[in-house]
Image: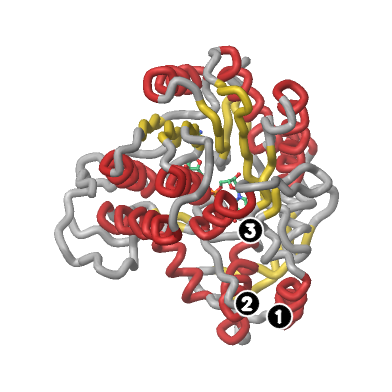
Amino acid sequence: MIIEPKIRGFICTTAHPIGCATNVQRQIDHVVVKGLIESSRKRVLVLGCSTGYGLASRIVTTFGSDADTVGVSFERPPAEGKTASAGWYNNRAFEIRAKAAGRVAVTIEGDAFSDAVKAEAIEAIRQSLGQVDLIVYSVASPVRTDPKDGVSYRSAIKPYGAAVTSKTLNTGTGEVSEISVEPATEEEAAATVKVMGGEDWELWIAALAEAGVLADGFQSLNYTYLGSKLTWPIYHKGTLGKAKGDLDRAAAVIRGQHGAHAAHVVALKAVVTQASSAIPVVPLYGTLLIKVEDEMGLGEGPIQQIDRLFRHKLAGELLVDEESRIRVDDWELSETMQAELTKRWAALTTETLAELADLPKYREEFLRLFGFGLGGVDYSADVDPRAVG
Ligand code: NAD
């Protein structure tokens, strides 16, 4: 079939197998060209391994420091006449390349929140890695079923306390408008913490510890976004920020149980991913950030951020902020960059968008998440959606 992007709101329901494989290869190339990363952590578990920051983490550890990995993600395989999800193609492309490089790469596709998948991952670790020295938690999901009582929770990305009115962007039409978002109820805020907070991270560490598959001195990382004051009303001060704050709590608990090395929250920059494109206001901020960081020569996507995390922030002496977080959002949050973003934000309208921000590049990056718009791929070719490459 000829595979084209089918965009519905903020998701694309199709993905291109060859394009996704090309995307994975490009990320691998980025790491390999930079050379080896010194690390003793050679056995890695990546939760949320198929796209965005999790995929970048799996690529950087595998191709930067010769690590073997078990990855967990929730992805859709191809079906008759239907493409797989992008992450499914990414997983296959990653496995082929990792194995060709002599590395172990075992992928489990299932619900990371469930006890069954935790047990499956532990078995895979026992068989393929023995133990793990590094766990990267990069799951982003709108729903979670608590394995203890079977109750399902859905996150609500809303302000907390009071309604918020902000500029926003329709990335399809390019229209900048104002939205007002009502505050979350207490129940919605609690559900968001249940889905995106630190509880599942703690459950993973507890399950791995109980199974005896945590190596001495293991490290675990969980990714957060603190972000610009421009997005604080909807993000940092909203329900998602509450959930992310809960990661700091969970990190302290895990450190208390296993030692200072055992848990760090890592603050990363805003990038275009499937998860971030679903958050109101954030895509408008993203189009602005892409333009300003490119002008300053500081543009980074997931692979550049995660390469910098492992190559520079985790190697050598670990520098952390007052909450024990590792900061890779330093460039985005620098005073110079924030001053420029704030100035432009005030002037943003549908008419000024093209001059102040970069919607075309945002759209390109969005389509690339699904394997579209990559150079060297023949999109007019008939492709079997079950093809992996
Ligand atoms: P993403 O949508 O690209 O990736 C999410 C991953 O989670 C995928 O691998 C998906 O398969 C997996 N997943 C979802 N539900 C799952 C489930 N039930 N079981 C197993 N796997 C599941 O998201 P991302 O933007 O890379 O986000 C990863 C983390 O990074 C999140 O914690 C996010 O808050 C954080 N972060 C993102 C940004 C950003 O701008 N995108 C910035 C800073 C921090």
Asked whether residue 278 is in view, the answer is no
Is disc 3 in contact with disc 1, using a CB cutoff of under 8 Å? no
Q: Which residue type does callout 1 highlight? A: Arg
- Pinpoint residue 2: horizontal percent, then vertical percent: 20, 59
Specify which label sits upstream in the sequence, 3 or 1. Answer: 3
Q: Tell me the quadrant of ligand 1.
A: top right
Q: CA distance from mark 3 to mark 1?
A: 19 Å
Nearest to N terminus: mark 1 or mark 2: 2
Amino acid at the residue labelled 2 = Val
User: Mark 1 and mark 2: span between their CA atoms?
Assistant: 9 Å
User: Residue at 75% across / 52% down in the picture?
Assistant: 236
Q: Are marks 1 and 2 in contact (CB under 8 Å)?
A: yes
Q: Taking 180 as reference, is 77 left or right?
A: left
Q: Earlier in the sequence, mark 3 or mark 2?
A: 3
Report x, y in % for residue 112: 51, 29
CA separation in Å, label 3 and label 2: 14 Å
* Quadrant assignment for the N terminus: bottom left
Residue wearing tag 2: 292
Label 3 SS: loop
Q: Identity of the amino acid at label 3?
A: Lys
Residue under pointer 3: 269
Q: Residue at x 55, y 14 (%)?
A: 212
**Are the residues flagged by discs 3 and 2 in contact, CB closer than 8 Å?**
no
Apparent side of residue 96 relative to residue 305 in the rendered image (left or right): left
In screen coordinates, is 136 left or right of 224?
left
Q: Ligand 1 closer than 8 Å to the CB at disc 3?
A: yes
Look at the numbered disc 2 and give the secondary structure of its residue. helix
Q: Would you name the residue on which mark 1 appears?
A: 344
